[in-house]
Image: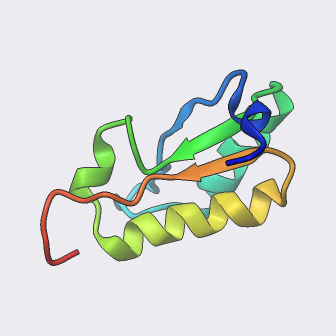
Amino acid sequence: MSDLKKYQGVIPAFYACYDEAGNISAEGVRALTRYLIGKGVNGLYVGGSSGECIYQSVAERKLVLENVMAEAKGKVVVIAHVACNNTAD
């Protein structure tokens, strides 16, 4: 971690976005990513601190992270929380 400056500033915990059926909304995730970047955040903390990640499947957590990464395209630091509350995952 030679460049610690990239971890300074506002790095909010990212909330997943859901559709009306309760599934992860890829477009909602991308829209929230664009919104937060537009507001000037320095990074996004995906999959942790919001509390919802422990209730998501591995596939759901991956879907959120993949869509954040695709939309952020290197514009901000993305920190991926990868811990889980069970040993199988």
The image position of residue 55, as x and y in percent, is 22, 55
| Horizontal relation, residue 56 to residue 33: left or right | left
Q: Is residue 4 above or below residue 53?
A: above
Q: Is residue 83 above or below residue 39?
A: below
Give me the residue at 30% from left, 45% from top. Answer: 52
Q: How is the image coloured?
A: rainbow
Give me the residue at 31% from left, 57% from top. Answer: 83
Number of on-image labels: 0
9 and 24: which is toward the camera? 9
| Horizontal relation, residue 21 to residue 44: left or right | left
Quadrant in the picture for residue 39 = top right
Give me the residue at 63% from left, 41% from top. Answer: 44
Q: Residue furthest top?
A: 9
The image position of residue 89, as x and y in percent, is 23, 74
The image position of residue 25, as x and y in percent, is 53, 61
| Horizontal relation, residue 47 to residue 34: left or right | left
Give me the residue at 41% from left, 55% from top. Answer: 20
The image position of residue 21, as x and y in percent, is 36, 61
